[in-house]
Amino acid sequence: MTKEGVRSRSESNLKEGDLVTFLQVARDKGSFEAEATRRTLPDGRIQIGPFSTTDSPLAYLDTWRSYRGGFAGKEEVMCDGKAVWHRSYKAELLNEKYREGELHSQLSGVLRAALNNSPTSYRRGPDRIEVGDYVYESDFMGNISSFVGSERIFHGNEKIFILFYNGEVTD
């Protein structure tokens, strides 16, 4: 992505600020609050979305698959039906006494609080935040055009969750 923006495959000029703003809305409305759009695909993956707004040609889609001890998936932003940005992720639950559903609820709350009005909505979360007995930590390198990161959740001193992710603008 240049400072001017990115040229999508549909030849529309997508500005970085427009993508960041859309990701802020999509993370809040299209992901964290999207149970109404959640469905199981024929291949067993879970899909949330697509989510879009009336004032943007962009749409957000998140698909993932759970497996014993973790999950893996991909978030995508499309412009006029063509992929313009993505983030892939893979997570492991390190202690089975923490059920994935409970941990997901905790993680969603932490991320929602931390990312509210954040100009870095393409990040998974802040560097560090504490919520009750849980500590969330994140490492991030790059910018919206190309990035990698990881996150960890601790309950007390025990690391119970780890996730790795990467993404980029895809034009």
Image (cartoon, rainbow, N blue to C red):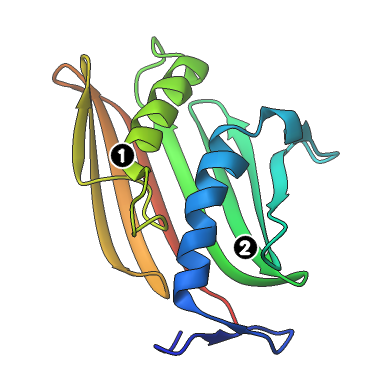
**Chain-order first, disc 2 or disc 1:** 2
The answer to which of 122 and 67 lies nearer the viewer is 122
The answer to which of 166 and 109 lies nearer the viewer is 109
Front label number (2 vs 1): 1
Quadrant hosting residue 103: top left
Residue 146 location, x and y as percent? 40, 73
Can residue 156 be seen from the camera position used here? Answer: yes
In this image, 13 relative to 103: left or right?
right
Q: How many marks?
A: 2
The answer to which of 148 and 169 lies nearer the viewer is 169
In this image, 3 relative to 129: left or right?
right
Residue 167 location, x and y as percent? 46, 65
Residue 62 location, x and y as percent? 63, 47
The answer to which of 19 and 94 lies nearer the viewer is 19
- The span from disc 2 to disc 1 (Cα, nearest Å) is 21 Å
The amino acid sitting under disc 2 is Val
Residue at (81% x, 39% y) in the render: 41
Residue at (20% x, 14% y) in the render: 133
Q: Identify the residue position indicated by label 2 in the image.
A: 77
In this image, 121 relative to 149: left or right?
right
For numbered disc 2, what is the local secondary structure? strand
